[in-house]
Amino acid sequence: MLEGKGLNILFDTERYRYKYVRLLDFKSLGEGVVQVHYALD
């Protein structure tokens, strides 16, 4: 699980696609906090 605030979470889509990362869940927790769940294939 990866957690961060606002723009501190930046996804390099090319790099993640290369590493076969699947985004499982992405939700805002409010106050600019975003929670991201992902899996490595």
Image (cartoon, rainbow, N blue to C red):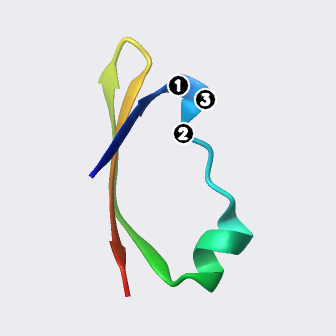
Residue 4: x, y in percent? 42, 32
Q: Amino acid at mark 2?
A: Ile
Residue wearing tag 1: 6
Residue 27 lies, with reference to residue 5, above or below; the image says below
Q: Contact, CB < 8 Å: mark 2 with mark 3?
A: yes
User: Residue placed farthest to the top in the image?
Assistant: 31
Q: CA distance from mark 1 to mark 3?
A: 4 Å
Going 73% across and 72% down the picture, which residue do you hit?
14
| Left/right of residue 8 with respect to residue 36 in the rendered view | right
The quarter holding residue 13 reads bottom right
Tell me the number on the disc at residue 9: 2
* Front one among 41 and 31: 41
SS at mark 1?
A: helix
SS at mark 3?
A: helix
Q: Amino acid at mark 3?
A: Leu
Q: Amino acid at mark 1?
A: Gly
Residue 3: x, y in percent? 35, 38
Q: Contact, CB < 8 Å: mark 2 with mark 1?
A: yes
Residue 30 lies, with reference to residue 25, above or below; the image says above
SS at mark 2?
A: loop
Q: Label 1: few (<14), some or many (≥20) within 10 Å?
A: few
Q: Contact, CB < 8 Å: mark 1 with mark 3?
A: yes
Residue 23: x, y in percent? 40, 66
Going 38% across and 33% down the picture, which residue do you hit?
34
The quarter holding residue 25 reads bottom left
Q: CA distance from mark 2 to mark 3?
A: 5 Å
Q: How many marks?
A: 3
Residue 31 lies, with reference to residue 35, above or below; the image says above
Going 61% across and 79% down the picture, which residue do you hit?
17
User: Residue placed farthest to the right in the image?
Assistant: 14
Residue wearing tag 3: 7
The quarter holding residue 33 reads top left
